[in-house]
Each structure stands twice: as C-alpha cells, then as structure tokens.
C-alpha cells in the first residue's frame, strides 16, 4: 500500500509508491558516451582553472602546476562571490533580496579523470574527507558567512556539468530553509525530551532493523523512513557530534571505509549510477555566536545524505516538495544489506 510519510529530521513529506516500480524503463539509465579532449581539472591543465586555494602535494611540487593529489580552486562560475553585505536587504515585502555573497570552491578529488569515490583507496578518500574539513574550517575562519554546504554531484542526472570527479563547497550569508527547518525541529525535540532527535531515531532504526543497511565502529547507515529517492542513504556518526569538523582521524578512516562499502554496493546494484552526496553539519561561526549555539550543539547531529539519481525529478517532487519514491526504503535496505553481507563474507 502506498504511504505518505513524514521525514523525522526535516518534517518533509514523501509518497512511498512501490507500484510505480512496475512502470517500463523505470530505472533505466542512459549510457554516458561523453568523451573529453581537454579537461580543466586534469593534471597538467592547472592553468585552465583560477589559482588554487589549497592542494595536497606530497612531493612539495609548486602551486598551480602538476604533482598534486587533491586540488582546491575557486569556482570559475561561482553561484556566490566573496564580498560583504552593506545593505542587507533590498526590495519590498514582495521582492526582498540580499546580495549573493559567499565563497564557492571546487575540490578536485583526484588528478585522474574517471575515478569515482567507490574506486578510491580508503587512504585517498580519507585525505579527501580531511580536505573537506580543512575547507569548512577555512570558511569558518573567514568569519563572514553564516552557512557552508559541501556536496558532490556525480553524473549529469545529479547536476554535474563536468565529468572529472569533484566536490563543491559553498558558503552563504543565510541558513537555507531546509537546514533551518532541521535545526528548529532538532531544538524543539531537545527542549521537550532533553535528547538528540537523531540519536533517538538511530535507536529506533536499530530496533526495527528493516531499514538498516550496515554499520562499522563509528557509523550507522540506513535508508530514511521517508526516503525521497530509491536507495537513498543516511550515514550517521554513532556517537553524538554536531559538526563534521569535530570528527577525529580514526573516525575519518571509518567514514571513508563505509562510504566505499555503500557506494560500491549501489554501483553494483544500479550499474554506474549518478548520485548526490550532501554533508549536513551545523552552520558556521556567525551562527555559533548566537545564544542558541549551546543547545544546537546538544540537539543537532551531523550526517551525510546520499541520493541516487536514477530518474529525473517530476512535477510533484519539484512543484510541491512532496517526492514520489517508486521503491520503499525497506526494500532498498534489504537489497543493499544482502549485497553487502554477501560481498563481505
Ligand atoms: Zn579531467
Ligand atoms: Zn545525536
């Protein structure tokens, strides 16, 4: 039976409609025949990007030349630009606006053009995760913006415009409504119960088992109750932690390990799928200075969402924010659990 489900964290709604799975070509993915002749992110083409902000160069090679493992450059076509907000708001009650100031960087995962996260070594993926911490910390030190988001678009269905594996880090002068809603919900729950909503939710998921996918000493992975996408995953630290910046080196290695496990499983089941990875962590310094920070730290729990993009968004998803998911999260979790159990035996 189809269900309309409310998401515990965001309070958004999803229609779980398993019948839609029967439609022809429901999960078909067209093959990517793109080739590249000149890629600005490949090693040797460093002059095609803006000068780098940061790089991992194991042999101390010169900036903006070859010899790097991971490279961070300003986005050539940024959604926001560095600056300060002089007059914060303009317009009237109908057409309110603030300048799109912020910082928009690209983290180039690797010098190699076609290597996806699931094919990286645990050691290299751990270094990528450490670079993400470095960039979030850098954004925080700039002490200008309110919120930063790190995300990965893998494949054109996920919104990637370039094939070369990369992530983006974007900081904004506002906390976006989706995150604000999650924070508000977490705080309300904390006020009521003096406990973290996500810690409690993981407890229920573990008892229930049906949506659990896998775990290691540091992380639990499950398909959210109101998953918006087939095979949507949530990776949550087992110990309460409000910020990815507080994640310690050993937990970084365990995170790389579990990312490779679940992405490999998804890639085998869905065959070279496109996906988004989103890091949801507590907002930056300006927000931390508010009186609410103390209880936000106790109430919020950082996590990663992986959203496979195996079919395009449709009118209901886009127009109402009520997503239609053709596969129940219980079924997605069962398939993934079976695959992971079989391959790790
Ligand atoms: Zn490339
Ligand atoms: Zn928690």
Image: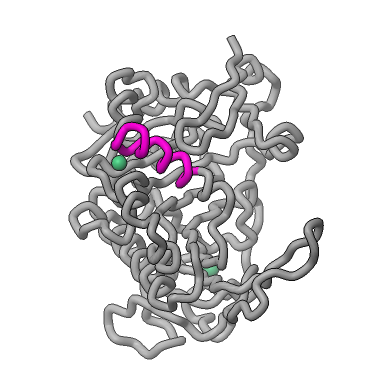
Instruction: Please name whichever residue, 259 or 212, is drawn nearer the observer in this view of the structure.
Output: 212
Image quarter hosting the N terminus:
top right
User: In the image, residue 140 lies at what x, y percent?
Assistant: 40, 71
Question: Per the image, is 217 magenta?
Answer: no
Asked where in the image residue 71 lies, by quadrant, the reply is: bottom left
Residue at image x 22%, y 39%?
A: 216
- Majority secondary structure of the magenta segment? helix
The answer to which of 286 and 79 lies nearer the viewer is 286
Query: Residue at image x 50%, y 55%?
Result: 152
**Where 232 falls versus 68 (above or below)?**
above
Within the image, what quadrant is residue 60 found in?
A: bottom left
Say which residue appears at 57% left-offset and 54% top-offset. 176
> Looking at the image, which is closer to me, 221 or 103?
103
Read off the magenta span. Answer: 182-197
Q: Where does residue 245 sit, x and y in percent of width and height? A: 31, 61
Q: Quadrant of residue 234?
A: top left
Q: Identify whether 255 is placed above or below 98.
A: above
């Amino acid at each position: 039976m189809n269900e309309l489900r409310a998401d515990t964290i965001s309070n958004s709604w999803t229609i779980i409609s398993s019948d839609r799975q029967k439609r022809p070509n429901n999960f078909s993915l067209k093959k990517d025949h793109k080739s590249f002749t000149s890629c600005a992110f490949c090693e040797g083409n460093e002059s095609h990007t803006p000068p780098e902000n940061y790089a991992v160069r194991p042999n101390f090679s010169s900036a903006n030349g070859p010899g790097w493992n991971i490279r961070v450059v300003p986005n050539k076509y940024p959604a926001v630009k560095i600056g300060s907000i002089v007059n914060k708001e303009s317009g009237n009650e109908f057409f309110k606006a603030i300048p799109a100031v912020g910082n928009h960087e690209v983290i180039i995962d690797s010098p190699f053009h076609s290597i996806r996260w699931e094919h990286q070594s645990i050691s290299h993926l751990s270094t990528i995760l450490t670079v993400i911490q470095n960039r979030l910390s850098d954004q925080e030190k700039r002490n200008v913006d309110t919120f930063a988001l790190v995300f990965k678009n893998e494949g054109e269905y996920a919104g990637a415009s370039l094939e070369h594996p990369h992530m983006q880090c974007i900081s904004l002068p506002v906390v976006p409504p989706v995150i604000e809603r999650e924070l508000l919900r977490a705080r309300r729950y904390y006020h009521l119960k003096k406990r973290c909503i996500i810690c409690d939710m993981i407890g229920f998921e573990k008892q229930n088992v049906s949506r659990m996918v896998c775990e290691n000493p540091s992380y639990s992975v499950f398909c959210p109750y109101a998953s918006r996408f087939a095979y949507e995953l949530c990776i949550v630290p087992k110990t309460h932690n409000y910020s990815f910046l507080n994640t310690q080196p050993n937990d970084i290695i365990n995170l790389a390990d579990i990312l490779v496990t679940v992405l490999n499983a998804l890639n085998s089941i869905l065959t070279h799928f496109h996906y988004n990875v989103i890091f949801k962590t507590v907002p930056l310094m300006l927000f931390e200075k508010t009186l609410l920070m103390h209880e936000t730290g106790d109430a919020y729990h950082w996590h990663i969402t992986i959203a496979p993009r195996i079919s395009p968004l449709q009118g209901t998803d886009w127009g109402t924010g009520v997503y239609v998911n053709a596969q129940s999260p219980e079924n997605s979790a069962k398939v993934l659990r079976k695959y992971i159990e079989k391959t790790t035996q």
